[in-house]
Image (cartoon, coloured by chain):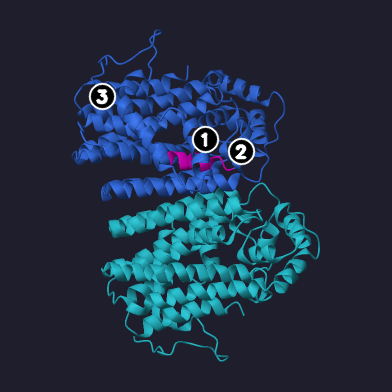
Chain colours: A cyan, B blue
Amino acid sequence: MGVVVSLEGDRDKRGKPSLAALTALVEEDLKAVNELIVQRMASPVVLIPQLAGHIVAAGGKRLRPMLTLAAAKLCGYAGRRHIMLATCIEFIHTATLLHDDVVDESDLRRGLASANAVWGNKASVLVGDFLFSRSFELMVEDGSLEVLDVLSRTSSTIAEGEVAQLITANDTETGETDYLNVITGKTAKLFGAACRVGAVVSDRPRVEKDALETYGVNLGIAFQLIDDVLDYSAKQATLGKAVGDDFREGKITLPVILAFRRGDADERTFWRRTLEDLKQEDGDLERAQTLMERHNALADSVERSRHYGAIARDALGIFPDGAEKTALIDLIDFCIERAY
Amino acid sequence: MGVVVSLEGDRDKRGKPSLAALTALVEEDLKAVNELIVQRMASPVVLIPQLAGHIVAAGGKRLRPMLTLAAAKLCGYAGRRHIMLATCIEFIHTATLLHDDVVDESDLRRGLASANAVWGNKASVLVGDFLFSRSFELMVEDGSLEVLDVLSRTSSTIAEGEVAQLITANDTETGETDYLNVITGKTAKLFGAACRVGAVVSDRPRVEKDALETYGVNLGIAFQLIDDVLDYSAKQATLGKAVGDDFREGKITLPVILAFRRGDADERTFWRRTLEDLKQEDGDLERAQTLMERHNALADSVERSRHYGAIARDALGIFPDGAEKTALIDLIDFCIERAY
């Protein structure tokens, strides 16, 4: 059943990092996670598996549960608890996605059909609640108070990060520190918890749990930074997501913060009109992209991302070399290089 | 510090049952709960305590945490864990209220200013998520896997009940069994869990935990039935809530189910127009009330409520007589008699 994984990591034909090494490493476990996801989203109330299935199926990469699986492998774990806990992590993530997509009273709509567009706000909220509760049921079944502690605190932090994002939305005065706090809360902490849980089930010493959490949190920040870059770069179109969603919603991300701070008075008037007042015309998105290009805002956001990627890489230094470590390091490169 | 509580229960001057006996019994503990609520909804993200404070302050009776406190007292509990767990129960309830008030894309609005009307849907959803996560943090702090098991399963059930209610909304074909399933999930199970937790912290035998849960679930059904009656009865106005909210939303409650099933073809056309198609005109609410009167729908809903109240009362039979038991029995009467 062994999977051959190159210790050099996996690069595609153009020498680009890919997810292949990680995917191969956790392939069988991930299959078990996917089966458990379907099994545990079941409910006599049929709308629940319908709506949850829509979002879980659309979820795609399963990056977060893969982190738990790979972290457990890195720690030499040989049991089955990581399957259930990886499922918990994906349920929390899916609940967050559902709640994140609930639109406000504004007329804004995402480029794609989200669950709330199909079934309405309320159904999205309630099915999110169900998945969230179900995730705690799974943790209780697992029975580790340490895991429960990590994940309940993470859930509060995610909610705090999301509320903080709501407050910074449409506020061009938002600084880089505020932005970092927001993405750490809403994205990176769950990456960190997903990794830490892998060490917790393996009963590793605290220094290894902390190292894996540090890896995860910094990977998560790097990941979100690139996500926010992609929302303004043409590359995004090839990823199946629409360019310009953040712009249309007036979300304040690092590319905006850098372009705004480096811009002149005219440019700041433009950013305020489009992102604060949400008065947008044809050609505004293109102008935003031009201004970002002028001020190197996208390239420098990628540079910032590399910084967090470097911290993540060094955090893994205490672990022995091997296929697992290589796959996790490749993942950092993959998350950053997808910007190009 | 003793509080004198009449073993005859507490009745006001007109001989009506009141909450006074229960309130006196748990007064000091409830004060501690209220302090813990304020303390644990704190967050550096100020919108969270603002919005949560709005809904917690408006929440009123604190019926659910009082159940935990009184059940623990009935079981002779002498520790402090019931304070924290009663706070958990109230946080879960408040999160549910916040999510329940999220409006769909329809034009419907509640009579009163709800949190989502003031701060928007998304803030309500996210602060609800925060309170929900915080409630699990408190449970983890308490450290009982049995409590975590009870409350995580209850949370899933509440979400299932809420989704089921969404499906039955505007469907005049909904039967009494469907309705009972909905209110059991969305309301009664949390009443049951609140009571059970009181026996769990007291380390009582299973038969007592089950008895308290049975009391709570049936009290919850009785309570919700009367709540649904009050939405069509003039009495409601004196309670500070608007009559007719359920009607305007097209919610299918027992008074509607009974009036629809007992009505003729003309009447059913009326119910379909107003509740399914939500085409409502001046005078429609009054006509609905007249039809309910004609078919005894409100009085018979109160009768149904008495049935569940009787089950709740008998469930307490295994406990010794005393102030606690009397207060819990009075509570049943209070929940039902407030219909008049």
First in residue order: circle 3 vs circle 1: 1
Left or right relative to A126: residue A243: right
Left or right relative to A31: residue B143: left
Residue on which the image places disc 1: B54
Residue A43 visible in the snapshot: no
Residue drawn where x is 54% and y is 88% of the image: A12
| Relative to B241, residue A45 above or below | below
**Relative to the observer, which residue lies in front, B253 or B188?**
B188
**Do the CB atoms of the residues marked 2 and 1 lie less than 8 Å apart?**
yes
The spot of residue B53 in percent (x, y) is 49, 36
Q: Is residue B151 magenta?
A: no
The single residue placed furthest to the top in the displayed view is B13
Residue drawn where x is 75% and y is 63% of the image: A264
Residue on which the image places disc 2: B118
Calculate the distance from the C-alpha at mark 2 to the C-alpha at mark 3.
40 Å
Q: Mark 3 is on which residue type?
A: Glu
Calculate the distance from the C-alpha at mark 2 to the C-alpha at mark 1.
10 Å
Q: Which mark is residue A37?
A: none
**Do the CB atoms of the residues marked 3 and 1 lie less than 8 Å apart?**
no
